[in-house]
Every structure is written in C-alpha cells, then in structure tokens.
Image (cartoon, coloured by chain):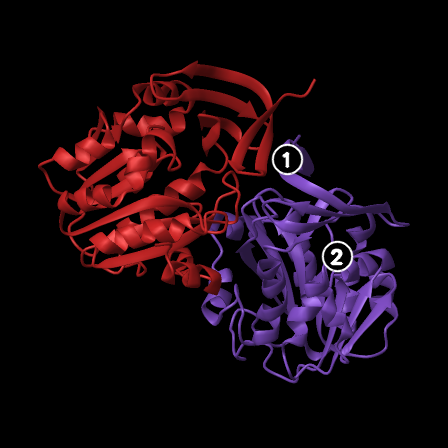
Chain colours: A red, B purple
Amino acid sequence: MSVWFTEDQVPGLRLSCRVSRVLHQEKTPFQHLAILETEVFGRVLTLDGIIQTTEHDEFIYHELIAHVAMCAHRGTLRRVLIIGGGDGGTMRQVLRHRQVTACHLVEIDERVVAVAREFLPALSAAMDDPRAKVIIADGIEYVRDVQEAYDLIIVDSTDPIGPAVGLFSADFYAGAHRALAVDGMCVAQTESAFHNARLVPAIFARMAGNFPIARLYLGAIPSYPGGPWSFTVGSKLYDPAEPVRPPPGDLRYYSPDVHRAAFALPPYVVQALAHPPS
Amino acid sequence: MSVWFTEDQVPGLRLSCRVSRVLHQEKTPFQHLAILETEVFGRVLTLDGIIQTTEHDEFIYHELIAHVAMCAHRGTLRRVLIIGGGDGGTMRQVLRHRQVTACHLVEIDERVVAVAREFLPALSAAMDDPRAKVIIADGIEYVRDVQEAYDLIIVDSTDPIGPAVGLFSADFYAGAHRALAVDGMCVAQTESAFHNARLVPAIFARMAGNFPIARLYLGAIPSYPGGPWSFTVGSKLYDPAEPVRPPPGDLRYYSPDVHRAAFALPPYVVQALAHPPS
C-alpha cells in the first residue's frame, strides 16, 4: 500500500509526497496540524494541509529568512522578534548570531510549538536558549501594542489565507515600522514570485509604502515548489542586499555570495514589481 | 469533473496539474508523447509522463540553457549544436544572437519536432529560420561521428533514464570536446541539485574530466520542482561565469546580473560537488 499526502499549492497545481507514517494530527483552535514521516523530505509539518517545514530542506528557508537581514544589518543587532515560526527553525538561525541578546517568538497557536517540541527537536531546541522567549499571542495585535523596540522583525508566517492574512497588510507593516529601532529591518516570506505574480508586487508595494528601503530576494526551496520563493525586506537605513557582517559558521545554504545573488531578480520579476495591481 | 496529469518526479514525490484538455497523445518509437492544456502552465509537452516544457515558464529554462554560455563566449560564436530540444525553444533563444550563422538541432524523435510544430508554434517557429537545420538522428552517434567543429554544444535532453542516459556519460562529453572548436563550450541540463544530490556531482565530475574548466549554475524552474535546477558547463578556454557579450533584447529571465548570480552556489551544493560518488 502506498499512502500520499497531497497539497493544493495554487489552483490547478498539487504536490504529493509518499507518507510512511502519520506521526501526529489534530485540529487546533486555529488550524489542522500534522506531522508526517515522508520518504523525500523526512518529517514534514503541515498546517491546513500545506507544508510549512521539512527536516531535509528546512535549512534553505530558515537560513534565507534569517541571515540575509542579519548579515546586512550594520548597526547594533540585539533584539529580534519573530512573528509565527512556531517550529523554532528561524529562531535557531537567529540565535546562531552571538550578538543577539533577546529573541522573542510570537506564535498564535500554542499547539504548533508543543508539537514541534515533540517531533522536530532539532528545530525547536532553540526555544531552550536563555535568550529565547516564546509568547503565545496574535502577532498582529502584539506588533500593534508592543512598547519595546526591536532591531529586526522576521515574519515567518503561513500563506496569506486564513489567520495569516493580516500579516501581509499595510497596517501590519506600519506596525512593524513603529516597533523597530531607528535602524531596524523587517523581513517577511512572501510566496512564489512565479505563481503569485499579482500578490507579490502588491505585498512589495505595501512594504515599500512603509519603509524607505524595500527589496525583494529569491531562493529555491524544494518543498515550496513554484520556482523562485520570495522574501520582502523593509529597512529604515541599511541596504539589505549588501552583506557586511560575517555569517555564523557551518551554514548549508547561506553565504555572502548567495546573499548578493538572491537579490539578482530576473526581468520578469522586476517588471511585475514595477506594476503592482491597483 | 476534474482531470489531473501526475508526474513522478523522484521516488515518493509527485507533481500534478489540472488538465482542461488533452490536445494530443501518441506512442512514438522512442517514448510516450503528449500535449496537455493546463490551467497553471498553459500547454505542456510531456515525454514518458515527465514535463519537458510549458508555455508559461519555458522562457526560464530556455533562456538559462542558451544565454549563459553564449554571453560568456568571448570568441567567434557562429556555429551552435543542440542535442535534443525538439520543441525548438532552445533554438529560438540561440537564434536571437545575430552572430550565429548555423544552428543544428539533433533530435532522436521526429514526432517531438512534428508535434511541437503543430502545438507549440511560438517555440518551434525558430526551425524556419534560414540558419536553422533539424537533423533527426541519435545525438550520441552524431557527436561521435561529426567532422565539423562547433563553437557551442547545448545538451537539452530529457532526464538520464531511457534514451537519454548516454547523453550524461563521460564518453559523450569526450565526444562533445572533440566536436568543439579550440575555444568551444558545452552546456547541459543536469537535474535538481537538491533531489539528485548524488547524480549531479557524478555528472559534474564527468564534465570536469573532459574540459579544463567546468562550472555548475542554478535556476528556479516552476515546472521542474525540486528547488534549484542545475546546468553544467564545460569550457575549453573561457570562464562561463562571466558575462561579456550583451544579451539579445526583450529577455524575461536572463540578465547579466542573473547570469553571475546563477553561479553563486549554496555551500550544500559546493560540498556535494567536492565529493562525487566514486
């Protein structure tokens, strides 16, 4: 017998992985949550039937979302806020930077954290670091109300459907701008630049409306097909495309050359960004 | 009713596209050949159930396989040989370079050419260019026996299973080296650098065994999931990573910056290339 997990990626496109074991599944107050053992990606965490992270390729996404902004930040980079990212993978990369003194992770669904702690210990162990703090709360409200200033905000969210829609709004980016220090940066995962050719420019325009510097960068993430996956950075002062700080050791995806290369956008993406849907 | 085409990408991983119409299918003497109308990718050409090219994203693959070597070639670049590529998409990109005087395409399966001419006219129209010549023959034998020298050989093949296996062999690369001018280059599509983590270094080692300069570069191709798709270049004289010749106008994926960026390999790929399976 052969058991397959199938994800509806965009209308008319599906990705399927053979599953050797369903390790866990539950309906949380926010979403359906599962941990699957797969042949191709090892353990896979899904939310509402969409792959969020996998053991075998998580390093690509997590190194890309964390180290680009961190290595481009020329100033004091001590306090980092992660919105979402309840698996702990982004937090692990952030805490590899020794100068970080506090990493706060705001996850709406405490079950994601609990299940990641049980089934993805390599990622979630970062939460035991003395500099780490996990806050179970709505990231939109947290950013709106927070009084302290962060040096970097990382939006490690699900797709812009359901609970995460607000994390892609202009209001949220305005809140992130307020919650950042004078030289702060904000980076968000922002979907496939190929399949979401209308959404990506719209999100980019919202970021650019709230930050003096906005840049898009790309990476190829095997478990998020759709070709080039995009990340959008808003920055108050520093150019996100220029790595200046040495990265932590033993990385598998990130290097300063990969950092610069991620900002080399194909003309079709450049053109799409120049003409956001009105 | 909903009809889906499903491709077995690697064991345990499948991609499916919703099909609005099966425009053509046949069993040729070499393989199963189909043209599907899909929601996500427009018309799709499949061989033995694997997507070869699609209307919507063909520009990414074809611009990457053609313009990198062509824009890095510092010498006289007049005669180009394409092995495979019966849809005509690579030939179209090659012929955008005015200095090319002859582009020979050696396709083993004449039905691929005939079907592409009927259903993918935007790609196959390149075959009507007076500089184009289509030769129906086995590419391995053609390269072994050919007497004339080419400036560039492009191996636009199917995956290394079935008829195309020999196109990934050390013997074939040795033949390509012999069929090239003293400053010639050879570029081949060489599969996903993530999912084929053993195959890609093995192919790279074979290319490096036959050419003084061998380089790998990457691109994100939506219809070939598996994250970073690899291309391997063998060169007798010129550095493939350095664009020197201006590209043709109106490209949608290629630019000199994208060219340089494609050679920025993540550490996990660099490490894999350094340790090919013995």
Chain containing the residue with disc 1: B
User: In the image, what residue type sits under mark 2?
Assistant: Phe
At label 2, counting other C-alpha atoms closer than 10 Å, the crowd grade (few under 14, some 14-19, many 20 or more) is some
Q: Which residue is mark 2?
A: B119
- Picture layout, residue A32 above or below residue A175: above
Chain letter belonging to callout 2 = B
Other-residue count near label 1 (Cα within 10 Å), few / some / many at <14 / 14–19 / ≥20: some
Examine the rendering and report whether any part of residue A85 can be seen.
no
Q: Secondary structure at mark 2?
A: helix
B63, B188: nearer the viewer: B63
Which residue sits furthest left?
A147
Identify the residue at image location x=34%, y=18%: A111
Q: Give how far across and how far down residue A158 sits, in percent.
A: 38, 34
Q: Which mark is residue B14?
A: 1
Q: Nearer the viewer, mark 2 or mark 1?
A: 2
Q: For residue B2, what is the image quadrant?
A: top right
Residue shown at the point (54%, 46%) measured from the top left = B227
Q: Position of residue A64 (x, y in %)?
A: 38, 47
Residue B13 percent across, percent down from the top left: 62, 34
Q: Is residue B262 above or below residue B160?
A: below
| Distance Cα–Cα, label 2 vs label 1 | 25 Å
